[in-house]
Image: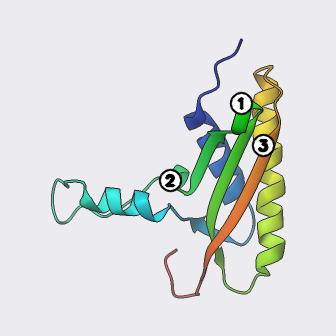
Amino acid sequence: MTVIRPTTLLGVAAEAALAVPGVAGLQPRLSRCLAAAAAPTLTDATPYHTSPEAGIRADRAPGGSGWHIEVRCALAAGRRALDVAQNVHDRVGAAVISHLAALDAVERVTVEVTVTRIASRHDGA
């Protein structure tokens, strides 16, 4: 039996989501932002940075019947949110299924996409 690491799935899902045109970045959950902000830093000059995977959550589906992937993303201005979210949903699902198939671990995958904000042209996302 192949052991599937959720951290690996996070990377696969983040890469797929960030490749979608119109995705400005991935947004971590509030709890993760607060935890990172409360963590001690080396210097005040150290920039606050979270990994792209922070905007992805991978959990076993109830009953262990596959995986549930949650993607939280910020979109670029000028794009239809529904179209971009659907594209993220499809690409992340396909990437995770392909990754699992390569490990001979074919399992059901559900993907949930949440648009957290629309980044203005002046935002750094």
Identified at 72% across, 32% down, the residue is 63
**Crowd tier of the residue under label 1, counting other residues whose Cα lies within 10 Å: few below 14, some 14–19, many 20 or above:** few
Q: Please state which of residues 18 and 103 is positioned toward the viewer in this rendering.
A: 103
**Is residue 85 something one can see in this rendering?**
yes
Camera-nearest label, 2 or 1? 1
Residue position marked by numbered label 3 in the rendering: 95
**Is residue 19 something one can see in this rendering?**
no
**Crowd tier of the residue under label 2, counting other residues whose Cα lies within 10 Å: few below 14, some 14–19, many 20 or above:** some
Horizontal relation, residue 109 to residue 56: left or right: right
**Crowd tier of the residue under label 3, counting other residues whose Cα lies within 10 Å: few below 14, some 14–19, many 20 or above:** some
Number of marks: 3
Residue position marked by numbered label 1 in the rendering: 64
Identified at 61% across, 63% down, the residue is 72
Above or below, 121 against 57 in this view is below
Type of amino acid at the residue the image marks with label 3: Ala
Type of amino acid at the residue the image marks with label 1: Gly
Above or below, 82 against 110 in this view is below
Camera-nearest label, 2 or 3? 2
Cα distance, mark 2 to mark 3? 18 Å
Q: Quadrant of residue 9?
A: top right
The location of residue 3, given as percent across then percent down, is 64, 19
Cα distance, mark 1 to mark 3? 20 Å
Above or below, 13 against 117 in this view is above
Residue position marked by numbered label 2 in the rendering: 54
Which of marks 3 and 2 precedes in the sequence?
2
Horizontal relation, residue 42 to residue 19: left or right: left
The location of residue 47, given as percent across then percent down, is 30, 64
Identified at 82% across, 63% down, the residue is 87
Residue 103 image label: none
